Image (cartoon, rainbow, N blue to C red):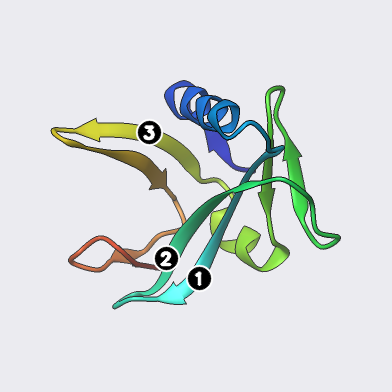
Amino acid sequence: MITVTNIASNKIQSNLLKRGKGIGIKVGVRTTGCSGLAYTLEYVDDLLPEDVVQDNTKYKIISDPKSLAYLNGMTIDYVRNGLNEGFEFVNPNEKDRCGCGESFRV
């Protein structure tokens, strides 16, 4: 299960509204970077047959089965630090992050 904080949920809903379409977000991992894995987040208009769907009252949280093993128990937040802002992934499965913060290891 993936949890989304209230501020992140409001941002997701706002972005879906601005897009004018979409059923939710798809969260996953891809192989990259110094530590091996990086998070992905994209807005989704249609489901794929293999998608795992977690229904939220306002939108769907979608993952592929392979990524879900890395994401189970994760919290998605939206943070502002100075001039920077964006989604932050708080994942209890992470063992280490690379120095630049772009990738992680489980």
- The span from disc 2 to disc 3 (Cα, nearest Å) is 17 Å
Residue 73 relative to residue 54: left or right: left
Helix, strand or loop for disc 2: strand
Q: Amino acid at mark 2?
A: Ala
What is the quadrant of residue 94 in the picture? bottom left
Q: Residues within 10 Å of mark 2 (few under 14, many from 20)?
A: some
Cβ atoms at labels 2 and 1 below 8 Å apart = yes
Please indicate whether residue 98 sits to the left or right of residue 35 in the image.
left
Is 35 or 15 nearer to us in this picture?
Answer: 15
Residue 74 picture location, percent across and down: 51, 46
Which of the pair 78/96 is nearer the observer? 78
Residue tagged by mark 3?
A: 78
Kindly state the secondary structure of the residue where label 3 is placed: strand
Cα distance between the residues tagged 1 and 3:
21 Å
Identify the residue shown where x is 40% and y is 45%. 90
Name the element at disc 1.
strand
Q: Dot 2 corresponds to which residue? A: 38
Q: Position of residue 18 (x, y in %)?
A: 54, 29
Figure quadrant of the C terminus? bottom left
- Direction from residue 57 to residue 6 in the image, left or right: left
Find the residue positioned furthest to the left: 82
Residue 2: assigned label: none
Type of the residue with mark 3: Tyr
Q: Which of pointers 2 and 1 lies earlier in the amino acid sequence?
A: 1
**In this orientation, which residue lies closer to the viewer: 72 or 8?**
8
Q: Are marks 1 and 3 in contact (CB under 8 Å)?
A: no
The residue tagged 1 is: 30
